[in-house]
Amino acid sequence: MNESSAYLSARELVGLYRSRQLSPVEVAGDILARIDRLNPRLNAFTTTTPELAMAQAVAAERSYASGDPAPLAGVPMSIKDLTPTQGIRTARGSLIEPDWVPDEDAPVVARLYTAGAVMLGKTNTPELGWKGDSGNRVFGPSYNPWNLERTPGGSSGGGAAAVAAGLGPLAQGSDGAGSIRIPAAFCGIFGFKPSYGLVPQYPPSAVGDLSHLGPMTRTVDDAALMLNAIAGADSRDRLSWSSGVDYVIGLDSGVRGLRVAWSPTLGYAPVDDAVREHTERAVAVFTELGCHVDQIDPEMPDPAGILDVMWSAAMAGYFANRLSDVRELIDPGLLAVVERAKTFSAADLAQAMQQRNTYYTGMRQFMDQYDFLVTPTMPTTAFTAGLDEPDGWVRATLAPLDWTPFTYPFNLTGQPAATVPCGFDGSGLPIGLQIVGRWRDDHSVLRAAAAFESAMPWAGTIPPLD
């Protein structure tokens, strides 16, 4: 392998390992060298683990020689710096405990190791994943491979930038209000937020059952391979569950005859002209694939206010009883969210939870009529790196995340949702299209994304870094 092969998919790597045309050790070494070369420009990785990676690559190579490789043996991957990794620094973008070294792996990490994946290191994130940019006061901002002045998004922005830049085909992300889909859309890759609980989360997220763990990859097939490795119940996460589904089988079976609801604004979201134009064009692909497409809004109000109360209260709860001790160490933007929670009462939080249930019921009833809801993923393309929200954004609500109106609704409902690349704006920045599925129908979302990918392939389009 050489750097021109950095964009091989996990599926391609496994095939080449099996045929002995490539070596996991060679691939790991080459990608680590590529990280050394590009990471100073991208700041995608906060910590690299070359010794661990090479040891795992050697083990993978031996497994191919013995004829008994694990499903992802030798495939390079990265882990978000919010996710605990035994013996590896996990700073969480926070000055409070920036040198924390966990004494156990999160379930998602242990499962990727068991599947044979090769650990490259930890990827950048804002403090506790609180915003849709990946800057923090420990490591600074990450940068978008398509334009090094722009954000890769957040909060899984380091992982998205890594995948887009050919620094490993697999990245683990987490998504509490869009944190897989925002950076995947901004970086022109595939991102998948599974149904809530399909991938166990331990330790629990600061934002509780808003947070989902999932894959960020360059192809839909790679995401399905990764999901197979990480999905399934774990007793440490009392709300996790197992589907018994192999997400790779039937991925190419198409979507002919299925019903698609296309909502370009969800009835309330402002959208840039370029985003509207490209997503309108992309939706037509589903008609060509044999779907029945209706342009229709769910006719439900913007749930930003619900998220605002729940998100602010969760962050305030995380710092409860120690805020005065750590105030100066907290990201100022996050501190404002924590302080905002002081304006809410316990009754406000209870009401928000009740409103969430009502919102879920309305969305479920709407989805009874459709197999998928399709929207833009983001209302705009990537903004200036290091900002908390898009340049000049005027909030329609007081919620600090109201600039990502298409993503957070489906953290409230727990539905599966993916983003697929569907074009570029006039500045050459990627645009994403979101595909939302019915409750726990993850396989259908992946199948729809794979059908779209077959009609509008994107993996061969790479950023101008080399």
Image (tube, rainbow, N blue to C red):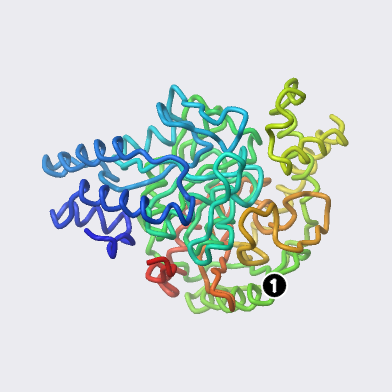
**Which corner quadrant holds the N terminus?**
bottom left
Q: Position of residue 33 (x, y in %)?
A: 30, 51
Q: Quadrant of the C terminus?
A: bottom left
Is residue 423 shown left or right of residue 65?
right
Asked if 40 appears above or below 105 in the picture, the reply is: below
In the displayed structure, 452 sits above or below 288; it is above
Residue at image point 50% right, 64% down:
188
Q: Position of residue 264 (x, y in %)?
A: 68, 70
The residue positioned 66% from the left and 67% from the top of the image is: 380
Q: Position of residue 259 (x, y in %)?
A: 58, 67
Residue placed most toward the observer, 120 or 222: 120
Q: Secondary structure at mark 1?
A: loop
Q: Residues within 10 Å of mark 1 (few under 14, many from 20)?
A: few
Q: Quadrant of residue 424?
A: bottom right
Residue 444 lies left or right of residue 53; in this view the side is right
- What type is the residue that disc 1 sits on? Asp
Residue receiving disc 1: 272
Q: Give whichever of 409, 403 is nearer the camera.
A: 403
